[in-house]
Amino acid sequence: MGSPSASDSAAQTGRAVTLRDVAQLAGVSIATASKALNGQPQVRATTREKVVRAAEQLSFSPNTLAQGLITQRSGTVGLLTSDLEGRFSIPILMGAEDAFGSDQTSVFLCDARGDNVRERHHLRALLSRRVDGLIVVGARPDARPSLGELPVPVIYAYSPSDNPADLSLVTDNVGGGRMAVDHLIRHGRRRIAHITGDATYGAARDRATGALDRLAEEGLALAGDQIWYGAWSEAWGRGATRMLLQRDPGVDAIFAGSDEIARGVLDVLHQEGLDVPGKVAVIGFDNWNILAANARPPLSTIDMNLEQLGRLAAQRLFAAIDGELGSGTETIPCRLITRESTAPLD
Amino acid sequence: MGSPSASDSAAQTGRAVTLRDVAQLAGVSIATASKALNGQPQVRATTREKVVRAAEQLSFSPNTLAQGLITQRSGTVGLLTSDLEGRFSIPILMGAEDAFGSDQTSVFLCDARGDNVRERHHLRALLSRRVDGLIVVGARPDARPSLGELPVPVIYAYSPSDNPADLSLVTDNVGGGRMAVDHLIRHGRRRIAHITGDATYGAARDRATGALDRLAEEGLALAGDQIWYGAWSEAWGRGATRMLLQRDPGVDAIFAGSDEIARGVLDVLHQEGLDVPGKVAVIGFDNWNILAANARPPLSTIDMNLEQLGRLAAQRLFAAIDGELGSGTETIPCRLITRESTAPLD
DNA sequence: GGCGTGGCCGAAAACGTTTTCAGGAACGTA
DNA sequence: TACGTTCCTGAAAACGTTTTCGGCCACGCC
């Protein structure tokens, strides 16, 4: 073993230990040390052993900045989100973080707070940090402005880009709506109503479209004779349900456009003494656990598989980083979560 | 203006534009270009102008990796969280991101999923990226193992470190409990009960302590003769309320240990036909908007100021990066949010 | 013994910056 | 004219790696 003075000098000065220290301790050149640690073949086994041991002894970890400088690859990606507080960004972000985490990629988190200039600002910073790619996570499933031509690949998640030349990953809201109604029909419900949120949201319209499609296939009319568009809130769920019951007291199932709305629906049904699911079945959307699982009774709902969407975005980005980036919009299917609010009608 | 061939060569090859290109276009040396852009005084005004113009024309942005390599400062910090899904990490994370965002610091997000080896793994990665500092965000307000001696400053947020030599920032749960009960007392309530979550959580015990302290000051006994420890769920809120009403039907206020529990409490009070707040006042904890603001009636609650905690953590980290790192535990006060569930008793 | 051949190793260039330091130009003064 | 001063500029080193390429050595073969 070489002179320990090398290791000591690094440790004593508080200076970070560098490849030079490792090489010195192992008694080889810097070049050889590098090759040994990177598994290059042109280094003798015993030499490699020496170097590895030295590196461990000094608990050496290579300076990624220097590596990135020379390899032209930083091993980082940017996650540009519009609203962190939004409950949709988080699962996507988790999925992405998860997919990267296994690899040697680190994630820069940037929240633009829905502000356009802040977004440009963050974008600039990320580019000057030489990220290898970018995932842009929107706040709602409507198209957002493209970032335009960039030196690195970009994936749009949840909110698609308005430029079809970009690659976007979105949830299948139409399919989700269809899935919810299909589930109700299979459980023997025939008089199905739909209470949902703000009609300016593509999500609301798409889910309604899916629901109506499935009803039409079955030759069923919408209970209550209309789609109840309103707000994404419990209060609207309560209000709409009262109106609905007045117009069509015989309704036997309600598809709510979100779990939040569904909670309001449940509340009024209880007040009116209508048993759920005995008399009326209720299904929500989002699978927002805190609301759905704790409801009385626990709420069946549609899960958008957001975490999977995030993971997929990460994978697509990986593929794009070396290779060509695809384009167009990829749609991720929803998943039915059955709980107690939708038992079969007997 | 110099020959435009420099700019073209960079643009055409797809190579990122570098300081060398800027210097060439401006007709100066790299050194001068650097000084001009960094506002160093020893460069003539007209020269600086030339360089700045060239940089704009090429839309130059300096390679942060190279800068970091030489200045020994990467301009990045790591945010090591234990559970992203946890509703407590997010606001803290937002606050921190916010505080950094203004400056030229970028944030690495790492979620350890509560897994210890994943945490070590992420830590290693962050250090090899030469982050300038670290914020560790816990999942619950009980002490967690210290990361030990590291080459960069570390701030523990929400979960304090078990090593008092580290600097930790936590919420004032005792104060929060006191604040809740104080509010009820000021509104004329005398028979106050406390339903809360898992007693193994320091948060539950601390809030109870604060509540009892304030009651004692007023010479009041706890309604229901006990603290109702249980689970952090709506179901427990419902169950405990039923038992409480049986034991002490005259209760005129309930302090719930979380908004989730409070929702369960409200539910049963409605069932029993007890008016809120006319007959019984209810106050929650967490100010989890989706639950509190949408409750019927909207729920008064205690806000832990988590976003501010995050911002503060970022500021403390900044201070620590150049200068000495403090130690001990700093406590951030809570904030009362009054809504309709706690009107004065008349 | 001369000569390829293959296996290992190290010197040096490169990545894109910042910073130090030497020196040139212009100018005023003796 | 010689000289000190004040400004400004650029050459070069440095940061910590990776990678290319030339060279050394031992070995086997004719």
Image: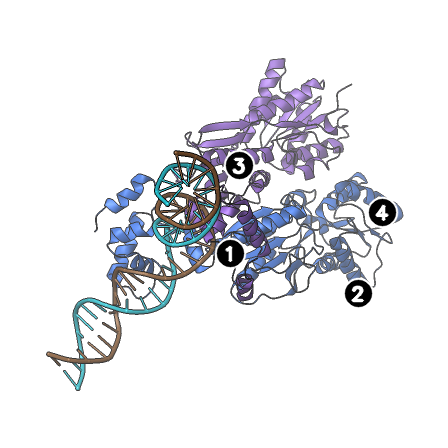
Chain colours: A blue, B purple, C brown, D cyan
Q: Which percent across, then down, holds residue B322?
A: 45, 35
As helix, strand or loop, the secondary structure at mark 1 comes to loop
Residue topped by disc 2: A217
Label 2 crowd (10 A; few <14 / some 14-19 / many >=20): few
**Which residue is label 1 attached to?**
B27
Query: For residue B116, which numbered disc appears in the image?
Result: none
Camera-side residue of B35 and A296: B35
Q: Position of residue B146 (x, y in %)?
A: 42, 36
Per the model, the C-alpha gap separating discs 1 and 2 is 73 Å
Identify the secondary structure beneath mark 2. Answer: helix
What numbered label is drawn on residue B314? 3
Amino acid type, label 2: Glu
* Label placed on residue A244: 4
Residue type at mark 4 is: Leu
Q: In which quarter of the image is residue B217?
A: top right
Q: What residue type is labelled 1?
A: Gly
C-alpha distance separating marks 1 and 3: 42 Å
| Marks 4/1: CA–CA distance | 75 Å
- Depth order, front residue of C23/A190: C23
- Mark 4, chain letter? A
